[in-house]
Image: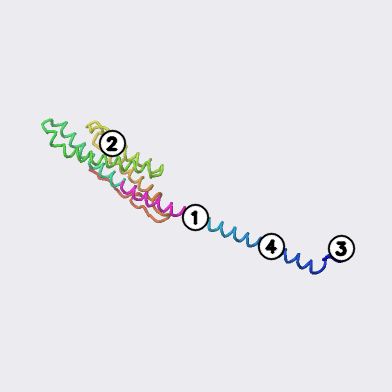
Amino acid sequence: MSNPDGSRTEAEKDRKRERRKEWITHGITLLVAIIAVGSTWLVARATTTADKEKEARASRSEVYADYLKAAATYRDRGYDAWRAVDARAKDPKIPYNAIRPTLANFEIARRAYRDQANRVAVYGSPKAWAAQKTITSSMLSTLAPVQVADKVGGPDFKLFNAGYKEFIMVFCEDAQAMNVPDCRPARGEDVGATR
């Protein structure tokens, strides 16, 4: 109740102070709740992002390793096929059936390589795709029949090695956690055959 002169009584002033304290307490509680929910959301999002990055690295690691294995096999079977076709071109007496197993192995390797290159296209980075193109350009065609004129001397092993090393560097960047790999093979060790 107010005093006769219209001023508030001490009891009214105390009630008003108590209501103000309650509002401040509720406001602080609401602010803390908002901060807690926001923090939880940010942590969950960061964890989800980290998990997705970890899954992507693991997936790329598998794809890239499979690709490199298929590339090496395709390079070797391509060289074998080129040599067989070249030998038959120089000596027509060699029956086709004599080189058929070599060509069949080449076809198997070619399909496996093409499949792995397609996986790099889907799961790999643009850098991985570019490195893959270097490797592909070093070998016999992945789509046309093998001919002696495809490559003089068969697959280009120097270009293959350069592309292989480039791909390993991309592998190190894309598939591994930061600062983990030392990537020594990509920095200079010879990785290809020197037939």
Residue 24, which numbered label?
Answer: 4
> Nearer the viewer's eye, disc 3 or disc 4?
3
Residue denoted by label 2: 142
Numbered range of the magenta stretch: 45-66
Residue 50: image quadrant is bottom left
Label 1 is placed on what type of residue? Ala
Label 4 is placed on what type of residue? Ile
The CA distance from mark 1 to mark 4 is: 32 Å
Residue denoted by label 1: 46
The CA distance from mark 3 to mark 4 is: 27 Å
The CA distance from mark 2 to mark 1 is: 42 Å
Residue neighbourhood size for the residue with mark 4, other residues' Cα within 10 Å, grouped as few (<14), some (14–19), many (≥20): few
> Nearer the viewer's eye, disc 2 or disc 1?
1
> Nearer the viewer's eye, disc 1 or disc 3?
3
Find numbered disc 3 in the image and state the secondary structure of the residue it sits on.
Answer: loop
| Mark toward the start of the polypeptide (2 vs 1) | 1
Marks 2 and 4: CB-CB under 8 Å? no
| Mark toward the start of the polypeptide (2 vs 4) | 4
Residue denoted by label 3: 6
143, 134: nearer the viewer: 143
> Nearer the viewer's eye, disc 3 or disc 2?
3
Label 2 is placed on what type of residue? Thr
Q: Position of residue 35 (x, y in %)?
A: 59, 59
Find numbered disc 1 in the image and state the secondary structure of the residue it sits on.
Answer: helix
Q: Position of residue 173 (x, y in %)?
A: 40, 50
Residue 181: image quadrant is bottom left
Judge whether 13 appears above or below 191 on screen. below
